Image (cartoon, coloured by chain):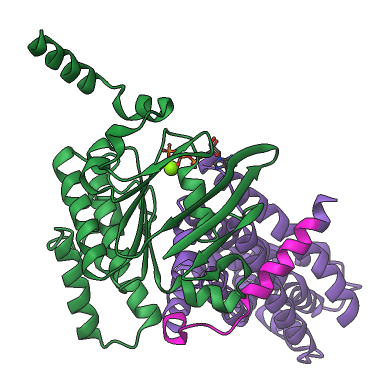
Amino acid sequence: MIEIKNIVKSFSDKRVLNDISTVFETGKTNLTIGRSGSGKTVLMKSMIGLETVDSGQVLFDGKDMLKMTKKERQLLRETIGMVFQNGALFDSMNVADNVRFPLRMFTNMTKAEMSKRVDFCLDRVNLSNAHDLSTSELSGGMRKRVAIARAIVNNPKYLFCDEPNSGLDPQTSIVIDSLIKEITEEYNITTIVNTHDMNSVMGIGEHIIFIYEGNLWWEGTRHTITQTKNNEFNDFMFNNELTKLLKASVNKKEE
Amino acid sequence: MKIFSDIGRYLILLKNVFQIPENPKLYRKKILFELRVLCLDSLPIIAVISIFVGAAIAIQLAANLSNPIYPRWITGFSAREGIMLEFAPTMINLVLAGKIGSHIASEIGTMRITEQIDALDVMGVNSASYLILPKIIACVAFSPIVIVVSIFLALLGGWVAGVTTGVITSYDYIDGLQLDYTNKSLIISLVKGLVYSFIIASVSAFRGYTVSGGALEVGRASTKAVVESCITLIVANLIITNLLL
Ligand SMILES: Nc1ncnc2c1ncn2[C@@H]1O[C@H](COP(=O)(O)OP(=O)(O)OP(=O)(O)O)[C@@H](O)[C@H]1O
Ligand SMILES: [Mg+2]
């Protein structure tokens, strides 16, 4: 479980996160949604210490990450997997070595054990034939999937995904989403996913927070989404061409 | 004021660099890799420059010192001192500051802006140490080889050029090279090499590691790395020369 309390973050005098508090539960896929530029990435990076916050607490199973010593923080991070918005693959290594890296760094596995684990993870993201490709040979979606494989290879307790399916086609998006949900439940991970993909929201959103201009504007599950009266949220969720079209056709039928 | 905060940040970075590695085996592999791409790959340019500049130095000296009032060994002797004390350590390392410095700064800078360094940090890797320490070790360890190769080739170039153009006889040149030879110049040269290579690797790594922005900033950082390495190196040269001579 990760609990954040009163997170405030500014860049020079621009406030990007304004007093955000919530709880991300273990074994659940927690979604952070919001428009581009609303502060999702900054919130995620603040939670793992890549950005320093102005004030607030980030409790990983009760322990405040911001108050940890460098050593403690390093040990905590060995239990974190992160998928960056644009992959952040090591471009000096091929696909298999990227995925293998955390194992080489932090475990005493033999070569054979590592290869087995790497094969398994690449299999799970449908990349079983990509071992020897260099990162420059990958498509955007493949990069994302390699990043996911690398994030889960060392059995993380916490999984952070920054827009894991932006730029992917709808089918692959669904595959990635269900993969994230599956591993979250299977290994009882605390998973946090940033997204503005409506399919993800309806598909895997067990706990959802909606960030609007740096504020936590709405919080709920995919089941309570349709009941909210929050204007900005409804606008964000339902004000698109497809829903307009659907509404229109429903209205027509009713007439 | 900026310079003081930069020096402070540089020292803090160095403190993070010199930490006991999480996994020494990986570091060993990285050092070997850096030795190849940073150091061995620089040998050809070092060789070419040493031979040609050595040749030019010998011809120049012989021409300027052709008056019979000078002893005949003076050309070889002066060439030896100049090459060992200044050319091989200082000039060659200025060239390396351009080649290795820009390489290190742009490589690490690119990793910074594409979030690869963040990815290392999130995994719990000490990214400063993992990325920079192997480079520093490789450069410093290789520097004696650079110095010795450069001295040897420059003196050889001088001999070939002097003898083939007929400005000095082989006997006089070698006589000059051997005159009053002690190891002091070689030691000074090696010390300079160690200091310079440390400066080049660490200053360039600092500039790369602290990039923020995009590709444009990486380019700027790389230029800055070369300029600042060169200036630091020249200042260090003055200090060492004063201390050791
Ligand atoms: N390093 C930075 N310096 C200054 N401002 C920043 C920095 N990083 C982010 N911001 C600002 O913080 C705000 C939130 O950015 P953030 O990247 O979190 O958005 P996001 O919700 O992830 O958007 P997207 O969906 O497009 O990824 C933006 O207004 C952005 O301009
Ligand atoms: Mg983002």
Looking at the picture, tell me which residue is in the foreground, A23 or B96. Answer: A23
Residue drawn at the location 41% of the way across and 25% of the way down: A231
Looking at the picture, tell me which residue is in the foreground, B110 or B162. Answer: B110
Q: Is residue A20 visible?
A: yes
Residue drawn at the location 80% of the way across and 75% of the way down: B78
* Residue A173 falls within the magenta-colored stretch: no
Tell me what hue chain B is rendered in. Answer: purple
Q: Residue furthest top?
A: A255
Residue A172 location in percent, x, y?
Answer: 16, 45
Q: Which residues are magenta?
A: B5-27
The C terminus of chain B: image quadrant: bottom right
Q: Can you tell which quarter of the image residue A14 is in?
A: top right
| Whether residue B95 is situated above or below residue B114 in the rendered picture | below
State the green chain.
A
Residue A178 location in percent, x, y?
Answer: 18, 53
Q: Is residue A27 left or right of residue B31?
A: left
* Residue B9 falls within the magenta-colored stretch: yes
